[in-house]
Image (cartoon, rainbow, N blue to C red):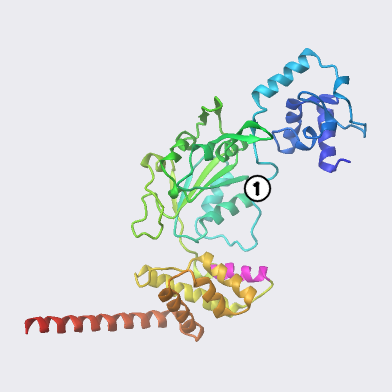
Amino acid sequence: MLNTKQTQFVEHAYAMFGKKELTVEQLKKANVKFGCKYAPQWLIKNKDYKLGKSLFKLPVDGEDVSVPTKSVVKSKKTTAVAEETKNEAAYIVSSLVGDIVPKKDPIFVPFGNYTDVKSIVKSGRFYPIFITGLSGNGKTMGVIQSCAEAKKELIRVNVTIETDEDDLLGGYRLKDGQTVWQNGPVIEAMERGALLLLDEVDLASNKIMCLQPILEGSGVYVKKINKFVKPAPGFNIVATANTKGQGSEDGKFIGTNILNEAFLERFPVTLEQKYPSTAIEKKILTNTLKAAGKSDKGFIEKLTTWADVIRKTYFDGGVDEIISTRRLVHITQAYAIFNNKVKAIQMCTNRFDDDTKNSFVELYTKVDSGSSVEDIMEQNRQQDLAAQSDTDEDKDESEDSDNI
């Protein structure tokens, strides 16, 4: 018994070719209408539908499809088409099927470079973008949601030091007992006209230089299968990174590398992503709680104030760690589960060293008691001045002792 989609395919294929016996190549052409460039697996994997080598029968009008292979008389022309299909495309496969357009996230609130990214995505032009910024500030989310709004297919690749040409362009794999060529995410994105997202690209080695011609928009020659792949209309590349491709001098982002200047030059623009404003973060956290069926305006107010103080202290050099927007969302989600504010903060700051974690929790108690950002920053300044004064006095005493 066929389902609705299978019935629609059969009706379309029969109307397209006017016959019930079709080759693999014809099945592929018919399946293009349904967003897939390969023959339907439900049909070619069913032995009842198989008539011969690369020849299958459509189950039309509820007919009995259990046709013996020996009853089929294949013409020389049919055999030639089947052999041509086998030689040209039967060994090139894809793991991407169906809809790969991202879904809209109800928590997401537009901010930062979102408008610019969305404009580029909607333009349909090939215009590579490099987005840099601290961890957890919405770089990747902004790209994903831009594609969701534009109904644009997105293929995301999480880059590591081990990522190479085989991972990106494709390679030979074992499938159903035979060796086949498996397209990589880059080739898939090019052929589908999708957006290719290279996430954490500054973790890559020089092996990523295989993308040079692709970043120029001119296509790429895949030497292993002797095929030149041209990008379909709409194809584009967006790369995200915590650095600007110059490495991490402060050691915050261990593993990031200095990217080749020629590689970076292929990106026309670099967008710097900052953390969202307090007002935007309040909306994000409100949406997070709402999605969990909760609401707590007071906690969100204090949480964003707490994060604001930490960030200002971080950029002033007072602390070595920072609270990202992502971590605020994690805290809000923990609060929705455990219904305990301090426990949520403690659990989500346990990743930091003990001194940092304790200072962050202590800081929240100050915010929770009603202290403002200005009050806390002033207290921190006074403490720094007092500490500096004590250091100077100790230094003077030491010098006096040396003189004696």
Q: Nearer the viewer, residue 177 or 381?
A: 177
**In the rendered image of this protein, does residue 65 appear above or below residue 290?**
above
Where's residue 2, x and y in %? Answer: 86, 40
The quarter of the displayed image where residue 233 is located: top right
Q: Is residue 232 visible?
A: no
Residue that appears at 61% across and 70% down:
333
Q: Quadrant of the C terminus?
A: bottom left
Q: Which residue is mark 1?
A: 101
Q: Nearer the viewer, residue 72 or 193?
A: 72
> Overall secondary structure of the magenta stretch?
helix
Q: Look at the numbered disc 1 and give the secondary structure of its residue.
A: loop
In reply to whether residue 239 is colored magenta, the answer given is no
Where's residue 141, x and y in %? Answer: 56, 56
Where's residue 398, x and y in %? Answer: 15, 82
* Label 1: how many Cα within 10 Å (few below 14, some 14–19, many 20+): some
Q: Quadrant of the N terminus?
A: top right
* Amino acid type shown at disc 1: Val
Position of 300 with respect to 315 (left or right) is right
Position of 61 with respect to 275 (left or right) is right
Furthest toward the front, the residue is 177
Residues in magenta, as a range: 281-292
In reply to whether residue 287 is colored magenta, the answer given is yes
Please tell me how many numbered marks the rendered image carries: 1
Q: Is residue 397 visible?
A: yes
Residue that appears at 50% across and 59% down:
112
Position of 91 with respect to 117 (left or right) is right
**In the rendered image of this protein, does residue 184 appear above or below residue 390?**
above
Residue that appears at 31% across and 80% down:
384
Furthest toward the top, the residue is 76
